[in-house]
């Protein structure tokens, strides 16, 4: 087995598939985990790119049925890195502790313990979230503050467990899961033994190359789908509650760079801000027939809420400096490709 072998969990997911592909494009062998043989077959049937790497022996897929209780040991054999992307991102649930807090914490615990026990993994990269940084009580997003890697979501397990708001459960689970990684590293004296890279992206958008069923969209894409199929041309354009984004390809590259540069830190991976009015304008300009079909409102063309000086800013200088992520995809490119692929697979 080559020295450049990485395990990528959740390889059938939106982010996981791009992470796997990007590692492969950078000369790595990838051992990806899937939850079933059916998902394995579906992934290879719908992605010619990954199928080609599989046929060439550079991509192998291993079944780990449950990220919380599943055994990663076989998938990790010979791997020097583990990119853990498998984590639920859906703002739908009726019990925060059951649906968000426990799955995120226990899944992360299982993954990092498996990496530690492998004896070969030297870099563990976890796909965290900007949710682990934001403060929901601080008038987000119109709080005129600049978020950096020093910021942490202050919500507690007890607070989130008692809340009946799914969003609170989700954002708290991401913060607690990432905090667990750093505490685990400290408690197990992993300095010089296993690095941890935590990536904190906001809404992840961009093209997708293997999702053929719109019901399987991740939360970011699902929310975008809702915006562009509003079906009420008489309505105003609704405001965007989470107006910060990053291109999925930049997120994937950041995973690779964390491993190749042996970093031991957290990074805010973000491009910038947007508003739903911008999204609607893109649809009317580039997809006029779909705008008519879905009765998309026009709103006030060119008047974007993210131009408000009070809108928050996400500082990504550290990721540029230490990971070399240049964020070359423009806002127009990212949203055009996102909208195009969503319409194609509706």
Image: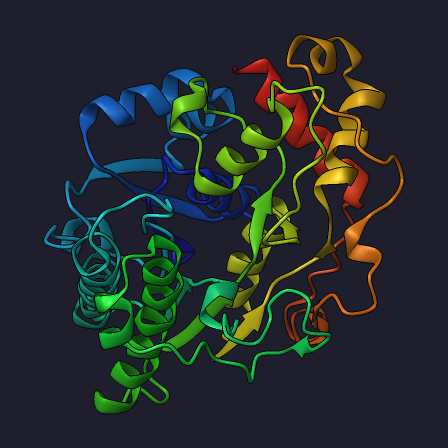
Up-down: is 39 above or below 202? Answer: above
Where residue 268 sits, quadrant-wise, is bottom right
Q: Nearer the viewer, residue 53 or 203?
A: 203
Side of 274 where 139 appears, left or right: left
Q: What residue lies at 35% left-to-right and 68% top-to-bottom?
A: 172
Q: What residue lies at 18% left-to-right and 69% top-to-bottom?
A: 113
Q: What residue lies at 38% left-to-right and 27% top-to-bottom?
A: 216
| Whole-percent x, y for residue 92 in the image | 32, 43
Q: Nearer the viewer, residue 100 or 255?
A: 100
Is residue 341 visible to us here?
A: yes
- Which residue in the rendered view is the most extreme toward the right? 302
Up-down: is 57 above or below 10? Answer: above
| Whole-percent x, y for residue 20 in the image | 45, 43
Where residue 320 sits, quadrant-wise, is bottom right
Q: Nearer the viewer, residue 260 or 106?
A: 106
Is residue 80 visible to us here?
A: no
Q: Nearer the viewer, residue 242 or 89?
A: 242
């Amino acid at each position: 087995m080559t020295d450049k072998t990485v395990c990528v969990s959740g390889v059938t997911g939106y982010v996981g598939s791009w992470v796997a592909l990007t590692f492969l494009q950078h000369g790595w062998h990838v051992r990806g985990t899937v939850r079933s043989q059916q998902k394995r077959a579906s992934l290879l049937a719908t992605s010619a790119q990954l199928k080609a790497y599989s046929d060439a022996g550079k991509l192998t897929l291993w079944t780990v049925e449950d990220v919380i209780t599943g055994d990663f040991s076989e998938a990790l054999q010979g791997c020097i890195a583990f990119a853990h992307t498998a984590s639920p991102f859906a703002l739908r649930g009726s019990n925060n502790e059951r649906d968000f807090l426990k799955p995120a914490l226990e899944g992360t615990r299982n993954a990092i313990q498996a990496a530690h026990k492998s004896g070969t993994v030297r870099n563990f990269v976890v796909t965290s979230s900007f949710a682990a940084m934001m403060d929901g009580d601080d008038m987000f997003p119109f709080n005129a503050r600049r978020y950096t890697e020093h910021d942490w979501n202050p919500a507690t397990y007890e607070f989130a467990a008692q809340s009946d708001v799914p969003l609170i459960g989700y954002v708290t689970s991401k913060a607690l899961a990432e905090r667990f990684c750093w505490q685990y590293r400290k408690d197990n004296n992993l300095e010089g033994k296993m690095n941890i890279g935590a990536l904190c992206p906001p809404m992840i958008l961009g093209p997708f190359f293997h999702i053929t069923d719109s019901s399987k969209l991740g939360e970011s894409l699902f929310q975008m789908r809702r915006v562009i199929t509003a079906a009420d041309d008489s309505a105003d354009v609704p405001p965007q509650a989470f107006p910060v984004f990053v291109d999925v390809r930049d997120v994937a590259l950041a995973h690779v760079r964390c491993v190749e540069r042996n970093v031991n830190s957290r990074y805010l991976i973000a491009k910038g801000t947007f508003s739903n009015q911008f999204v609607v304008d893109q649809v009317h300009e580039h997809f006029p027939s779909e705008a008519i079909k879905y009765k998309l409102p026009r709103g006030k063309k060119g008047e974007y809420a993210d131009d408000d000086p009070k809108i928050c800013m996400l500082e990504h200088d550290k990721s540029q400096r230490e990971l070399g992520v240049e964020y070359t995809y423009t806002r127009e490119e990212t949203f055009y490709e996102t909208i195009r692929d969503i319409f194609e697979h509706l």
